[in-house]
Amino acid sequence: MSLTLLNVIVAVVIAIAFAAANAAYLVWAERRGAARIQRRPGPNINGPFGLLQPPLDGIKLMTKQLMIPGGADKILFMVAPVLAMAPAIMSFVTIPFSQGIAAHNMEIGVLMIFAFASMGAMATLFAGWGSRNKYAVMASVRAVSQNVSYEIPMLITAITVVMATGSMDLKTISLAQAGGFWHWNIFPSLHSPLMPISFIIFFICSLAETNRAPFDLGEAESELVAGFHTEYGSMGFGLFFMGEYANIVVGASLTTILFLGGWDCPFGIFPGVWWFLLKIYILIATFIWIRWTFPRTTIYGLLNLSWKILIPISLFNLLLTAGLLKVF
Amino acid sequence: MILETTQQALQALFAGSGPADAAEAGSPRGNGVLTRDYKTHGYHLDAQVAPDQLLAAVTILDQAGFFIESITGVDWIKENQMEVIYDFSRYDFDTCRVVIRTRVPRDQPVVPTISTIYAGANWHERETHDFFGIKFAGHPHLVPLLLPEDADFHPLLKDFKA
Amino acid sequence: MGGYFSEIFYGSKSLLIGMGITFREFFKPTVTVQYPYQTIKMSAKFRGHTELIADEEGKPKCGVCGLCERACPSSCITLGSISVDIEVDGKVKKKKVLSKYELDFTKCSLCGQCVENCSFGALEFSKEYNLASTRKEDFHFNLLKRLEERNA
Amino acid sequence: MSAPIQLRPDETFILNVGPQHPATHGVLRVKMEMDGEYIVKSETVLGYIHRMHEKMGENRTYAQYLPNLSRLDYLGALGYTHGHVLAIERAAGIEVPERAEYIRAITVELNRVASHLFWFGAFVMDLGGFSPLMYAIQDREHILDMLEAVTGARLTYCYYRFGGLYNDVDDDFIEAARRFIPRMRKSLKKYAALVTGNIIFQKRLEGIAPVSAEMCRKYGATGPVARGSGINFDVRKNEPYSVYPEFDFDIPVYHECDSMARYKVRMDEMEQSLRIIEQGLEKLPAGPIMAEKKPKNIKLPVGDFYQAVETARGSFGIRIVSDGDKNAYRLKLRSPTYSNMHLFDEACEGMLIMDALAFMGSLDLVIPEMDR
């Protein structure tokens, strides 16, 4: 009993540390990447390659006063940033990084991650509603409708993968794809010939779920000032920021596990955690690359994309996979 | 082309009051239509109308397809008059700039609004009201535009002292 | 229906083209100047604030005619003069000599009217551009003093 | 994409966009009555950066007023100073040497490209894309370097003088401008692929915020806003001034009336400006840059003078009422964005806020120019 408890505590600590370190250094990576795309150097003063920038930013944010606007709903206002960060960290608990590296393996890992991902929408809503700011309310309403409509195609695509694999356990899903890249779910198989499209849908949905450009309607900094976190400063803002990046890591991890074979090596040699990390960082780099390339979509364009394109295609894919599984 | 037709149309406004006073010798000049040398003055037609003829004159231009350039005022303090100048121009290549001016007494500067004809006159009239205190009768929202909303001074008056 | 799919196709293609462009830009060298560490040389005609030009003896060429003071749109120049006796060809003559040339750079709009109107050719533009201070008084330049400092 | 709005007035709320807001590019305030994301009514509030340039025009001599003109529009300042010197030259009857006029045209067009570039970047940033702004600024930087080498300033130029120029251009400038043109053309291709062709961008602009030609006329909209509504109006062609009749260039006109049309007009205008610069460099005559017969202190004859020029934002007019003194009796500046912005209130009714702010971006606002 006590051993299990200790195990869980250690696992949670490692998960938090991993999430926080990733969140902090992804900010740095994003700033450097954006700068390179725009032919600037980016943060390069503090430390070699500006590597000390994230801790310094953290110190700055932590030493600032946390302001609660007058008339704000204090409880919601304080809860929201925590709610943005916590589910992302919780999701790490069940993600298997490698054969042996997983904080706590669950048979319903996929379900758990989606359950936690849905809580992100609540954080946005609380923040927007609680801060008593018209821009924030508008942004949070946008973000919630966006999250709701993108969860549907995302879940449908995940169900397709789960159906093809026959398990909701992330580890099993990974292991099912082992043995070279041709086994990965991203490539069409007998049972699910439309898998590449599923992968693209899943990728788009994870962009939208994490409120990343071009779907950053909840922030929409040129229209709604700073969106749902307009009124946040200090570490409240910091937590939102870190939550966003932690969510990106979760999204990339999930994409890797569901479609890119988890920790499997493309050529079947030396499978291990390094492959997993390599894959998620390539995906994250693509996230960054996309953000600094495209303008923002409109709210109706975004919803149209989900309801008119992504949901029909993913539903079709689901039905096709279900039928093929029955036939073969 | 449009120059002549507009001139005739504007000229017709003064049909009752004898020939147009094109003499330009007397200052202030009387109401009437003048053609100006475009090369030196930058506009073609210069019509001075009485305030009650203003709407009729602007309607002529509106029907002829002119667009509104600007509205402004001039404070002729020596003559104790205030002048409102309306600039009109055309989008097509039949270049014709028309200036409509009207003079009102300085102590009671009221002219009818033309924002009913040209919606774009709204801001120009508010601006002129800001700067000169000229009132535009019938204007829907004659509150300061460029000056602070509680401004009660008119900085372009010649007797304005900051 | 055909329009539906062709829009998806051409839409995705346009997105990929855009990503291709940013991808190429990523590998191009940076173009920025790291300002406080690197500076650039100002072009020859750059107009900074004005400076007095010295003659051969190091004295300002200025004859205190006051044209610059009058030409200045924002009246940011204040001149002062004293008369001194100088000997020209054995005769003692009174001559106005510049004793004060103050430029209130907070008001200056760098239009160049003073330099243009100067009848002695005694003014030039400096090439100074990194002027920064938190105090307003730092921008009240005493050009005469600056000239002496340059001479020294 | 505007849906019909039928609602009770108690269901709306007032949203204050500005005076500090990322989309207003300065201190502009728009009071919007909102129904959710839809705008029911909007009222623009100006004057946050009003400096009463017109009164300064009455207090200063004509020459002293020169620097003021470049403080109107900080992105395309040369166009405005050009208008001022042309107005004075027209009224005072000063003949300008041909070389000076050519250099004026070249520099004005360079400045127009710079202004459009910055607008392009800022506009795409309004839509949420950040990188194109940086690319645009890189290209604009070349222009600013060139102009700095000639005029001595980067933004608020005071380069034109009555009867000529402050100083002559040198071979370096001509060489730099020649080199710039092909580079800029390459960049324009890049922008077309990166931004204009982008599906997200097109979806955000096409069919959004229609401004009819009739509405333009009623509000006096000029420049790219009018040309995006199918009006073939450009002061450079309609009332040729300076040496523009010597150049072979087209006026891009689009008939879609939407934000995309206004965008495309400006993008095409950059190409046309490059053509003008190219021809100007080709034809640049030798000779003096300053009129020989020019009074030292300019006094205008009694009268009323008007000069319109096409700036990057539209038709800029300057009206000088002179009583024969060395400063103007009345000096009126007709600024193009003032009229262009005016139609925003009417046009944005029933629009979504994000479309309305994109529309505001497509109007190319420079607030100091509007407030004067």
Image (cartoon, coloured by chain):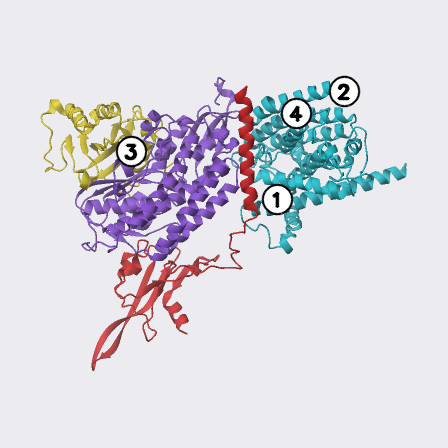
Chain colours: A cyan, B yellow, C red, D purple
Q: Are marks 2 and 3 in contact (CB under 8 Å)?
A: no
Asked if badge 4 and badge 1 are on a common chain, one would say: yes
- D42 with respect to D164 (left or right): right
- A324 with respect to A6 (left or right): left
Q: Are marks 3 and 1 in contact (CB under 8 Å)?
A: no
For marks 4 and 1 on the same chain, the one whose residue lies earlier in the sequence: 1
Where in the figure is residue A274, as x and y percent of width and height?
Answer: 75, 44
Q: Secondary structure at mark 2?
A: loop
Q: Nearer the viewer, residue D86 or D34?
A: D86
Q: Nearer the viewer, residue A279 or D226?
A: A279
Foreground label between 2 and 1: 2
Mark number displayed over residue A30 = 1
The residue type indicated by label 1 comes to Glu
Neighbours of disc 4 within 10 Å: few (<14), some (14-19), many (20+): many
Foreground label between 2 and 3: 2
The residue type indicated by label 2 comes to Phe
The residue type indicated by label 3 comes to Glu
Label 2 sits on residue: A328
For marks 4 and 2 on the same chain, the one whose residue lies earlier in the sequence: 4
Q: CA distance from mark 2 to mark 3?
A: 76 Å
Asked if badge 2 and badge 1 are on a common chain, one would say: yes
The residue type indicated by label 4 comes to Pro
Where in the figure is residue C63, as x and y percent of width and height?
Answer: 27, 68
Q: CA distance from mark 2 to mark 1?
A: 45 Å
Q: CA distance from mark 4 to mark 1?
A: 27 Å
Mark number displayed over residue B69 = 3
